[in-house]
Image: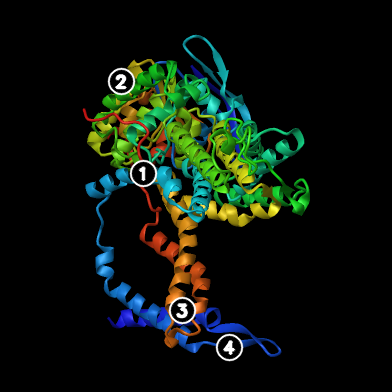
Amino acid sequence: MKRAVRDAGFSALIALGLFAPLIGLVTENGDNGLVLRARPIAVAVVVILVFLGRLLMLTRAAHIAAPKPAGPSPAMRRAGSALAPALLLFALVLPFGGSRYYIDLATLVLTYIMLGWGLNVVVGLAGLLDLGYVAFYAVGAYSYALLAENFGLGFWTCLPLAGILAAFWGVLLGFPVLRLRGDYLAIVTLAFGEIIRIVSLTHGPNGITGIPRPTLFGLAFSMEGGEGTFAGFFNLEPATIQRVIYLYYVILGLALLTNWFTLRLRRTPLGRAWEALREDETACRSLGINVTNTKLTAFAIGAMFGGFAGAFFATRQAFISPESFTFIESATVLAIVVLGGLGSQLGVALAAIVMVGGLELLRSFLSFLADQMGSPVFAGIANELPLYRMLLFGLALVVVMVLRPRGMVATRTPTAAMGPH
Amino acid sequence: MLAVTGLTMRFGGLKAVEDLSFEARAGEITAVIGPNGAGKTTVFNCITGFYRPTEGSIALTDSAGTRFALDRMAGHRIAARAKVARTFQNVRLFAGMTVLENLLVAQHNVLNGASGFTLLAVLGVGRYRAAERLGLEKARHWLDRVGLLERADDLAGALPYGAQRRLEIARAMCIDPVLLCLDEPAAGLNPRETEALNALLRGILADRCSLLLIEHDMGVVMRISDHIVVLDHGKKIADGSPADVRADPAVIAAYLGEGDEDEATA
């Protein structure tokens, strides 16, 4: 107990050091520019919380350290297998019940799910740590934007082309990094992501505007209505929401296609070779597997899905610029894959929902909470509450990784089974 | 079938193997023995393409009479084309994959060749289905041979050590090798497992696959080898039948050490 108190005191001391500048000091607009205001009470609250939390953790350590059963319990397994169909059903009916805000948010989440599934091929299956995945997203987006601008090609023609071009860049990146592993590979891919963004993308920082929207079998979603448009054909009142819902279903379809393809791919010889490569490259070589080709296909196929997602991003935004493809995008997608559980399709989907959707919902929730705190006790905290969302979010990520170090869904389904004998 | 001629391997200033020549004949078990640091594993790595020899040649002639210059082939081609398989001193399984998957990965070239650039395999149609069924059949055959059929769907990393060794041999056999190189297959096995290993190796030999092995366990070597090559400090000091080698004074001096003869007869 004495040791626990000492340990907790030490943690509180660290918290004090960290949060004194982070929370304890706030800048405000004064008479002559910014003035610094101290908030000792807020710091004290956080430090005491850390002290109590650590104490609680240590005194309950016996429970936490108890060995857990190796696999998930049957009940959990059942819940897990029901989760994916439930999510799919929810995704299918969402546009009928949701407002524009939620459909837009869901479209964003689905884009990240698709990116996560694409990166999962490279990082989760082949075990190649790629920190520059956003590069392929950018290649896809710019491919579509430029092909549409210069050759007047439509979205559905450009989609496969964007994928192929991104795959080509994947191979191009793959060649120089064939011999690299782990940290070194991560650094080079990181650099690649930055180079793609910085090196003279067409129109530079101005980006590309007026990227055409996708059509439904030739029917455009235009506001004028009339002949040849979606609204005109179905005798509807033209409305933006039709296009929003259509885009939502496009990305849902693309994401599901990615999922189906990756799930099938895992069961092919190539997919097994990727996983074997992640486990032991030397053993792969001794079995006659061409390590070079195997790695390059992983890069190419991962990049291809990034390219598809990029083309979709371009057509949804109708405007792209290098600003859309910064390192934070790569980091987010990688965090989704790691948090979800390397190699797990369901895990990636869950992680994307939590990371992209959850962050957004947390913002609304904190704003809502702030509105409720009318009492003078909370004065000075209430209007700042939404600013803490990143802090809370980071804390949540740390907690997940502490409790489930191998990601939210850590189970791996074998790609072949002999079955009972 | 395997002819090593004038093999020299240098790492910077260090000569790990110097002017080594020996032959491994078809249908025999050839053993390479020697004290620690004698260069045995280096020889193995040269034969299986993990190192490129500084000098010398390594030639493999299969039963059809085709000759492969192993010293000039890329690493993975030695397994894929010349059909030389190997195991590792510290077992290298795909620990996170199941036992069955390990054996399917070993058949990668055959299965991938039938997968129509992976497209047939993704769709699960055409000749890939037949190829996969044959692959599973072969895996089942080898699992049965090494007594691991019951554990086919368990993770390879979860097997006990002796079973992992057997699985590694089964995995190597799934590439249909003409020569199987075993790096200390009996290390860490108990006497009963060693006995089972001997039986397994004899069975593999009967399947027209020749064996080359590195071994420390003199009991294993003397009992099952047809031909022994002794290395010391990267040079060959003896070459012959187990009886010849055991009697060779140079071998006793270098490897067994004086007053340690009971080990040789154990």
| Image spot of residue B184 (x, y percent) | 39, 36
Report how far apart the C-alphas of labels 1 and 2 lie in the structure: 48 Å
Amino acid type assigned to the residue bearing label 3 in the image: Ala
Residue beneath disc 3: A15
| Image spot of residue B144 (x, y percent) | 26, 25
Q: Earlier in the sequence, mark 4 or mark 1?
A: 4
Amino acid type assigned to the residue bearing label 2 in the image: Gly
Chain on which label 4 sits: A
Report how far apart the C-alphas of labels 3 and 4 lie in the structure: 20 Å
Residue A75 shows up from this direction: yes
Label 3 in the same subunit as label 2: no
Chain on which label 2 sits: B
Report how far apart the C-alphas of labels 4 and 1 lie in the structure: 49 Å
Q: Are marks 3 and 4 in contact (CB under 8 Å)?
A: no
| Image spot of residue A24 (x, y percent) | 53, 84
Question: Which numbered marker is on residue A84?
Answer: 1
Please say if B213 is above or below A334.
above
Q: Which marked residue is nearer to the observer: mark 4 or mark 2?
A: 4
| Image-quadrant location for residue A158 | top right
Amino acid type assigned to the residue bearing label 1 in the image: Ala
Q: Residue furthest bottom?
A: A31
Residue beneath disc 4: A37
Q: Nearer the viewer, residue A184 or B191?
A: A184
* Label 4 Cα crowd, 10 Å radius (few <14 / some 14-19 / many 20+): few
Residue beneath disc 2: B203
Amino acid type assigned to the residue bearing label 4 in the image: Arg
Q: Secondary structure at mark 1?
A: helix
**Residue in the image at 43% along x and 79% along y:** A373
Residue B191 is left or right of residue B201, and the answer is: left
